[in-house]
């Protein structure tokens, strides 16, 4: 993730912080190790003469740092269209720009009427521009499509009556188009005791312990929490900072609702929020805001009768990975929205965000490079410790038992094993009685992240109860669901070879080799099963000799002398 | 390959408001349209833009997209802002007396002749 490595070390970081600094992702994907040029530009609605000034400022910077003219061209089309959108439709707006040698990152936020139907607005030719704009040659209905076409990453979210937020990135260096990191499972081989639990726990058979070193096969890893949960020796970890980073009044703190239920039954979520405020976090955002917004949007989306049923809500990024890797035939069932963490990441443009991500999948989404916002991933337990230090001063409020839940309209499935069972049942068309399913890799959603202390089945209902009482937990309409712009593509994780003929041959070899192995699935070789070892051998990841039964075949019975 | 704006203006019989360095910039291609989004998408530093728009959006087209020149239509005279932008960014403006269709027909002929192999 982001830049400014010089400023990465916070005032809170002591020597211990530095020692484990290599685990942090703060220096990854770093454009070129320089501070980005950044500025904000105010846009005035209806001022057609000044519209374009912001784009001009971007151009001046790009020319000064010697950016390729074609990339300047793309940036100008996107920036000018975005700026004129505000001039034409809104009262006022703000353009936030950050530029480094690797990318141009732009957010355009307006206080305008909003876009009631983004799908429609993304269609070429659709426009609601007033006559004044049309006389000047605008209003062709090509603005948003033009921005998308000319940028490498694009998102738009809008709340009717409040305004529109648009973000786009133009990559200035081709090597970055490979995309952000695919997973955030970090391994410290020195701590591994070779118990092989992770090898057995992985739902996609992506973990190997070979030559005494654990390894994750990136193309199979879906960034779920199974190996983390299985590991007792802390050899597998997330890329979070071990200390709460230094923060100012402008820092935004993002926490999952599950965080607030990690303090036992005696401490209410309201008290935790109060403690975090006392600790200096004045702007606290609950990820549940976006989760609720997504839930509403997906429920409305699922009412479309023409859609493949059941619809899956894209609430959990690891499940999206799972479906891409293992259930590509079900991709059409996924509602086309960004996950809540992605939606939050798109919406928040504050320069500094501290984010208590409870799982590697969320960490991965937040490591997608953005220049406008520096996101510090903090170890949720370090933040919990911080909150604990401030909780003592808050009077404890009595709490009663949660109310019984009403009838469920949506099937919620959590826990990767259950999710896989359900997806298999759906693939075999054995689930036809639900119209909408929300799938989470962890038990009870993010409450089941293994980082937490409270059992998710205890914490989650408590939180449900508390949200009816505490104002911070009540939906306030500030968060919006974000339509996914790029369709999801199947991932080739399960494929043996990109060439189908070669894959068939490899499949035959694997079958043949599997039959020669003992079939005990002992994992002594470091693969989760004999079949997995056979696959590893055929794909060149291991040798047949790794099987102790093969390298030391039983001696033939000695003949009697 | 390519033709300068001065040559185009001369062949069109059109008035030319020159930039700092005169009408020397090379034109390889012509694009005509009245929608800003189309013009943005088609603009390049060797594309002559033909348009009825003679306003601030054309000023931006010159400033942001580095177009080599603008051809206005129906004898419409550019405002002072546009003239200034043309001078500052060396993007001459030619003013055709014909309408879009007539002007494009002539420009097409000029560009085709330019492309045709020279014969004795």
Image (cartoon, coloured by chain):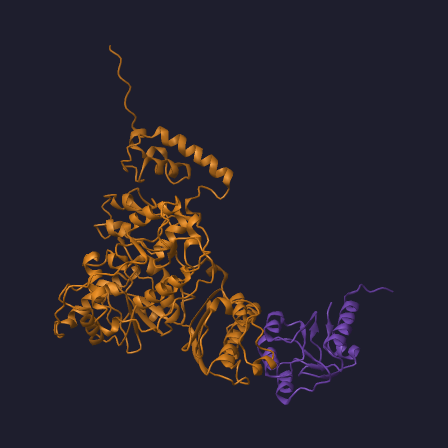
Chain colours: A orange, B purple
Q: Of A224 and B81, which appears nearest the observer? A: A224
Residue A372 location (% of width, % of height): 40, 72
Residue A367 visible here = no
Residue B89 location (% of width, % of height): 62, 81
Q: Residue furthest right?
A: B120
Residue A477 visible here = yes
Q: Of A561 and B43, which appears nearest the observer? A: B43
Q: Of B18 and A319, which appears nearest the observer? A: A319
Horizontal relation, residue A306 to residue A12: left or right: right
Horizontal relation, residue A490 to residue B2: left or right: left
Q: Quadrant of residue B24 in the image?
A: bottom right
Q: Quadrant of residue A284 in the image?
A: bottom left
Work out which quarter of the rendered image holds the N terminus of chain A and state it. Answer: bottom left
Q: Residue furthest top?
A: A561
- Residue plotted at (34% across, 68% down): A375
Horizontal relation, residue B70 to residue A209: left or right: right
Q: Quadrant of residue B84 in the image?
A: bottom right
Q: Residue furthest bottom?
A: B80
- Residue plotted at (43% across, 66% down): A32
Q: Is residue A503 above or below residue A29?
A: above
Work out which quarter of the rendered image holds the C terminus of chain A and state it. Answer: top left
Number of disc labels:
0
Residue A217 location (% of width, % of height): 37, 47
Residue A71 location (% of width, % of height): 54, 68
């Amino acid at each position: 993730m982001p830049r400014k490595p010089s400023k990465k070390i916070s005032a809170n970081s002591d020597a211990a912080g530095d020692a484990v600094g290599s685990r942090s992702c703060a220096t990854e994907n770093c454009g070129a190790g320089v501070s980005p040029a950044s500025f904000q530009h105010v846009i005035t609605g209806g001022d057609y003469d000044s519209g374009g000034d912001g784009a001009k400022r971007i151009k001046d910077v790009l020319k000064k740092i010697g950016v390729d003219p074609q990339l300047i061209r793309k940036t100008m089309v996107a920036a000018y269209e975005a700026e004129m959108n505000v001039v034409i439709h809104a009262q006022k707006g703000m353009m936030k720009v950050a530029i480094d040698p690797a990318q141009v990152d732009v957010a355009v936020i307006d206080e305008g009427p909003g876009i009631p139907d983004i799908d429609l607005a993304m269609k070429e030719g659709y426009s609601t521009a007033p006559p004044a704009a049309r006389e000047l040659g605008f209003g062709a209905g090509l603005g948003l499509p033009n921005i998308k076409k000319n940028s490498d990453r694009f998102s738009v979210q809008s709340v009717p009556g409040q305004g529109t937020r648009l973000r786009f990135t133009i990559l200035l260096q081709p090597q970055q188009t490979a995309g952000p990191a695919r997973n955030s499972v970090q391994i410290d081989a020195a701590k591994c005791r070779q118990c092989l639990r992770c090898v057995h726990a992985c739902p996609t058979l992506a973990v190997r312990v070979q030559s005494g070193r654990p390894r994750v096969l990136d193309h199979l890893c879906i960034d779920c929490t199974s190996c983390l949960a299985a590991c007792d020796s802390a050899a597998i970890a997330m890329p979070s900072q071990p200390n709460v980073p230094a923060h100012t009044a402008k820092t935004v703190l993002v926490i999952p609702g599950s965080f607030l239920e990690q303090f036992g039954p005696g401490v209410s979520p309201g008290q935790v929020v109060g403690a975090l405020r006392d600790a200096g976090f004045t702007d606290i955002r609950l990820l549940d805001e976006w989760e609720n917004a997504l839930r509403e949007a997906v429920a409305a989306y699922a009412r479309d009768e023409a859609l493949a049923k059941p619809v899956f809500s894209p609430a959990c990024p690891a499940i999206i990975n799972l479906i891409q890797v293992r259930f590509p035939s079900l991709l059409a069932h996924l509602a086309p929205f960004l996950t809540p963490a992605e939606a939050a990441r798109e919406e928040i443009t504050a320069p500094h965000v501290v984010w208590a991500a409870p799982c590697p999948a969320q960490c991965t989404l937040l490591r997608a490079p953005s220049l406008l916002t520096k996101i510090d991933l903090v170890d949720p337990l370090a933040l919990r410790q911080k909150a604990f230090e401030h909780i003592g001063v808050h009077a404890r409020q009595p709490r009663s038992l949660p109310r019984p839940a009403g009838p469920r309209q949506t099937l919620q499935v959590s826990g990767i094993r259950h999710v896989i069972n359900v997806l298999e049942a759906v693939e075999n068309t054995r689930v036809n009685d639900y119209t909408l399913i929300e799938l989470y890799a962890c038990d009870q959603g993010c409450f089941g992240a293994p980082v937490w202390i409270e059992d998710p089945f205890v914490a989650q209902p408590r939180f449900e109860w508390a949200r009816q009482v505490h104002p911070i937990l009540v939906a306030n309409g500030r968060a919006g669901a974000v339509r996914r712009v790029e369709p999801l593509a199947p991932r080739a994780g399960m494929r043996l070879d990109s060439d189908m003929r070669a894959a068939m041959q490899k499949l035959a070899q694997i079958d043949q080799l599997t039959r020669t192995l003992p079939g005990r699935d002992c994992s002594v070789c470091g693969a989760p099963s004999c079949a997995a070892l056979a696959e590893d051998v055929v794909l060149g990841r291991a040798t047949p000799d790794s099987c102790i039964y093969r390298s030391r075949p039983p001696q033939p019975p000695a003949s009697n002398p | 390959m390519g033709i300068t704006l001065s040559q185009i203006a001369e062949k069109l019989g059109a008035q030319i408001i020159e930039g700092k360095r005169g009408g020397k910039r090379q034109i390889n291609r012509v694009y005509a349209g009245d929608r800003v989004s189309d013009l943005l998408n088609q603009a390049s530093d060797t594309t002559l833009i033909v348009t009825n728009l003679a306003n601030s959006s054309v000023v931006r087209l010159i400033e942001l997209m580095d177009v080599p020149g603008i051809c206005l239509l129906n004898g419409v005279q550019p405002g002072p802002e546009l003239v200034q932008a043309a001078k500052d960014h060396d993007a001459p403006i030619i003013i055709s007396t014909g309408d879009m269709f007539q002007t494009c027909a002539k420009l097409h002929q000029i560009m085709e002749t330019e492309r045709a192999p020279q014969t004795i």
